Image (tube, grey):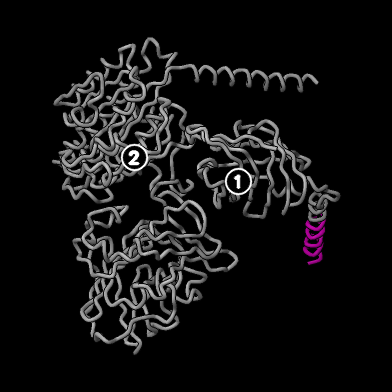
Amino acid sequence: MKMKLTIKSGLLLLLMLAGLSACKEEVFPVGLDAEQLVAGRLDGTWAKPTNIVTPDEVPAEVFGAMRLVFTTDETGYPSRFLAKDCPIVFAGTDATWKVTGSGDDATVTLTGVSPVDEFKAKVSSTALTLTFHMGWENTDTGETGQGDFSVTLARQ
Amino acid sequence: MSYFFIKNAGIVLSLVIGAATLVSAQNKTRKILVIGVDGIINTAIDYATTPGIDRLVGNASYSMNGYSGVPAYASTGWATMLTGVTSDKHGATANKSFAGNRFDTYPSVVNRIKAANPGIRIASVVRDKGINDLLNSGADQKFQFESDQEVYGKAVEVLKQSDIGAVFVQFSKPAEVGGSLGYQLREAQYVLAIQEIDQYVGQLLTAVDSRDSNADESWAVFLVSSHGGTESGVQASNSVEEFNVPVILSGGDMDNKELVGSAMAARENSDNILTLNKAASGEKTFVRIPINGTALQGMNKFTMEMWIKAGANSSDPSIMGDKNWDSGGNPGFIICRSGSSWKINFANEKSERYDIGSTRSIEDGNWHHLAVTFDKTNECIVYQDGVKMAESKLIYKAEDKMASPFNYICLGQEGTGSYGGGAPNWAGSFNEVRIWTAVLSEETIRDFMYLRNIETSRHPHLASLNLYLKFDEVRGSAIRDFSGKGNHGELVGPATERHPHYPIGLTDVAVNVLSHLGIRVDGAWGLEGNMLKSNVPFRLFKVN
């Protein structure tokens, strides 16, 4: 009986130590700066464009079937940006990104894609809304203008 | 340091190669091969062994669920494919005939190519002589044969010509077999006919690749089916199996991917749908149409019809209605969910109510056509997908009043806009909602249920059309009424999506042929197709 208790207590102690050890590994990092915090919210894959806003003369198709991937490095800072199926907005498929501001009002700056290389972002756990102001040209008619563009993507 | 150098050297090399590829692609001579096949059903290519078509699909924007248009005849399909407009414009609505066509107003893409660039040499190799005589009359070389084998042989010969710029080819064997034995995958002869077409396609691709000047050419190859067919082989001309067809646009600047309507943004000048979702916030999302003082309030006779695709729902939310649905005895009407099916409830001011339902499910992930005819002093009939489901004699008197005290017909909600059953609202998609202040016959409902742009059609009751919502808008909260009565609606709430009803259709062929050949589409031509995404003629640029 005593032997059984000892073994049981030992196992309990072992589990507690293991638990403490695990807790130590998972301590929430302190001192994250604003860029890391917003980058963490943007990190991941976003797709399925909805709530598209374009100037009246510009069709919603300019956004294509936009699919964006934001990655962060091991320290939580922005790393790579990939854009798929939206060549009119983001030509080039592999780039880097930086972000400033907060989740409700962030500014994302891109390097390696064009013509849009900066946009405002509002991000929640399920949706990312991009807005930007750009000039546009209908290459068939030569008509030009400028205006506000916006699209909401869903987290995948 | 060396890693940094190697990484950046790699990027520079990639950019150089990319730029060289781009320049190279731009300098190539653009050419096109359009292969139209009569009678490939939408499931055939996935089922049959088709290595040739698979080669094509591997470099294509495509959908096996494209839309051929109605009526789904080969003649109509070819007219739609080559003119880039639907049958209500090009007029070729007869079977095995182009009678009634308006090709003078809506000419074939072949004639448009020759008008824009006479230097492009075009060949048309077909089974149906009418295509060459009436549509492709402008082609430099026109051939007509009695068998697909002969068509294939001549097409290969034409593809060897150094100066050929566009080749249009028609194969018909799947329709010949399907018409006599049934368009069904259990029928070996039909599957073999598909595989025979596949061999032709594979060898035509090889012929393109084998051209002496191939390295200096940019070929687009389009493969489309002019129509599908029914399992029995009997033509109805307007069934899903007949107008659901593969459309494969390969090469050129097209994106390489399967086109899925629910993942595509609504397109200008297209058949779009409106989807109402359940907002996570609990806020109600619906469409409301003001009816105070209009013919839509308290109708004594009506036919309501709509296409719907149900989402995930529970309880008995309103799909469309003008009454307070807290009680079925309240005056007005409601079309609502009932189990996995649907019903109509209506009552007069004396709370004399009827509940008449369909017996078929609407919650199977498919589109369904719902229709109700109501004659206050006679009877009410409920139809689903053009088939009568139930009917009931009515005992109302002429002086009975059916009007709801609320001044809106709502979609996704009832007249008050605040019903809680199945909250926050019915979830699902709408297309082509029509209300007529007349009782339409079963035949009329069936004949016109698939037709778009009903306001310009030969529908026998156009004068009584009082609400016609197409939901083709791509943005904003206004929902336009095309009945001519000005009963425009308004979108309320946050949880909506808009998508094209079909990801691609035969009307898209002509505009993408022109786009590939660098020919500008004039808005005055009235073409209905859309350039695929990579071909949208817009560019963005930075401004201060």
Seen at 64% across and 47% down, the residue is A130
B502 horizontally vs A148: left or right: left
Kindly identify the amino acid type of the residue bearing the numbered disc 2. Answer: Thr
In three-dimensional space, the C-alpha distance between marks 2 and 1, rounded to whole angstroms, equals 29 Å
Q: Is residue A44 above or below residue B174?
A: below
Residues rendered magenta in the picture = A1-17
Residue B359 seen in this snapshot: no
Pointer 1 chain: A
Residue drawn at 48 percent across, 36 percent down: B536
Q: Secondary structure at mark 2?
A: helix
Q: For residue A149, which numbered disc appears in the image?
A: 1
> Residue B207 location, x and y as percent?
33, 17
The mark found on residue A91 in the picture is: none
User: Do tag 2 and tag 1 residues touch (Cβ < 8 Å)?
Assistant: no
Left or right position of B445 against B538: left
Q: Residue furthest bottom?
A: B350
B503 within the magenta span = no
Q: What is the crowding at mark 1: few (fewer than 14 residues within 10 Å), some, or many (at least 20)?
A: many
Q: In the image, what residue occupies the spot 43% across and 47% down?
A: B261
Whether marks 2 and 1 lie on the same chain: no
Q: Is residue A14 magenta?
A: yes
